[in-house]
Image (cartoon, rainbow, N blue to C red):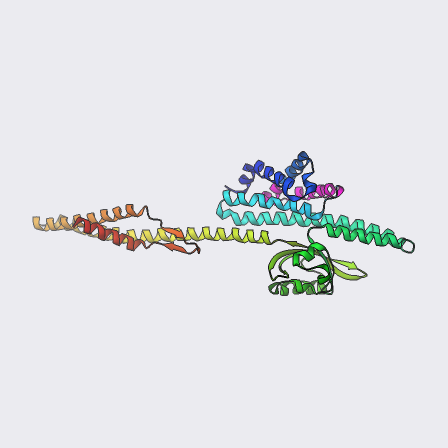
Amino acid sequence: MDLKRLLETHRDEIMGEWVRRILTEVSDRYSRRPVEEVRGTISEATEANFAVLTEDDFSRMNRFIEKITAMRLDVGFTLSEVQGAFELYRTVLVPILLRELDASLLPDALGRLNRCLSHTVRRFSDHFQAQHEQSIREHAGNLERMVGERTRDLAESEAKYRMLVEEINDGYFIARNGKLVFANKAFCEMHGYSVAEVIGRAYLDFVAPESRGQLTRIRGKRAKTGEAPDQYVYLRLHKDGRKLYSENKVKVITYDGTTATAGICRDVTERVELERKTLRLVELENERKTIALSTLRQLMATLSHYLLNANAIIGGMARRCVRATCDEERHSSMEAIMEQTGKTERVIAALRKMAEIRTARYTPESHTLMIDLTREIEDALTKTEQDEA
């Protein structure tokens, strides 16, 4: 079954499970939304995902993102809540892909799914952040005009901004000259530290050694050319020594009058591990097919050896029988023909017995084992000859 047919066949199942999980797993705000409203938005999202996955058409998804951004901001949803709702599509669809999709089509389907969700989450985050930043800029502009007489209002605005950032479930940070000058509670909890332990330290202190070179190159490129990836996956370093996959979405901003980098830090360990396990399953399936083909080739070579030899002897004895000038010579030729015919029959009988043998299997360590067909046939022939004797 190909991807398009799978999505069409399981459309109702995917939508139903997606709706159920949004209403029960994402947040209290989602659980309080009317069921029909959620079904309506999930129906639109499902059709938009279908267009991306089957036709690489992002236009419907872009329109849906603009609509859902306005809807969720109006009722006070946080960025991470809507991101979580989008991400649930992956956890609903992947098990169906593993169960129903042809193994050879799985890597492409997973790649399309990752590109679809990466585009969706990134574009939604950009819309959400842009509207939020626009609101902040407008408010800051008003405050600047009244700064002389409205100092208290400015302080209250900053407190509201910090409160909003603290409500985001994903980590949020601001770094200047490679050091953290702001981090919300979620960022600190992701790394196992308190806010006091984080502020003022180098960002690389919270990055696993094997990823520090990657982030150093990105920061250097951003400083020199202004052109560097604004979204990347790396290993963060937890206080207890664990190394966990994270995804950063960063942007250059002005903070306290100087250039700084602000970003959202998201844990993607579960997603990365799922992708790795899926790719390993595909590799094992390909290995099994390779062994099956090798077994078939060995079988053909073994059969050719025995049957062609027997056929050559039978043919030679038949010609000798035709040319024979006495009964003794003909009798000798017929005995040779009967002997080779019996050997051919024993080979066929041996193959029938071997039909019940598993030609390949996997050990718990995933090492492939294959039987020795030549030895199996030799053993079967020897046993048959002994039984006949």
Question: Where 274 falls versus 5 (above or below)?
Answer: below
Q: Which residues are magenta?
A: 49-74
Magenta segment main secondary structure: helix
Residue furthest out toward the top: 36
* Of residues 30 and 337, the one drawn nearer to the viewer in this rendering: 30
Residue furthest out toward the right: 149
130 magenta-colored: no
Q: Is residue 315 visible?
A: no
63 magenta-colored: yes
| Count of numbered circles in the view | 0
Question: Where 33 falls versus 165 (above or below)?
Answer: above
Please state the horizontal and vertical placement of residue 29, each as a whole percent of the image.
70, 41
* Of residues 322 and 304, the one drawn nearer to the viewer in this rendering: 304
Please state the horizontal and vertical placement of residue 297, each as a whole percent of the image.
35, 52
Q: Is residue 243 left or right of residue 311?
A: right
Residue at 60% from the left image edge and 58% from the top image edge: 244
Please state the horizontal and vertical placement of residue 125, each as a whole percent of the image.
70, 49
Residue at 69% from the left image edge and 50% from the top image edge: 169
Q: Is residue 40 left or right of residue 320?
A: right
Please state the horizontal and vertical placement of residue 241, each as a whole percent of the image.
60, 62
Which of the 4 quarters of the picture holds residue 227?
bottom right
Residue at 22% from the left image edge and 53% from the top image edge: 382
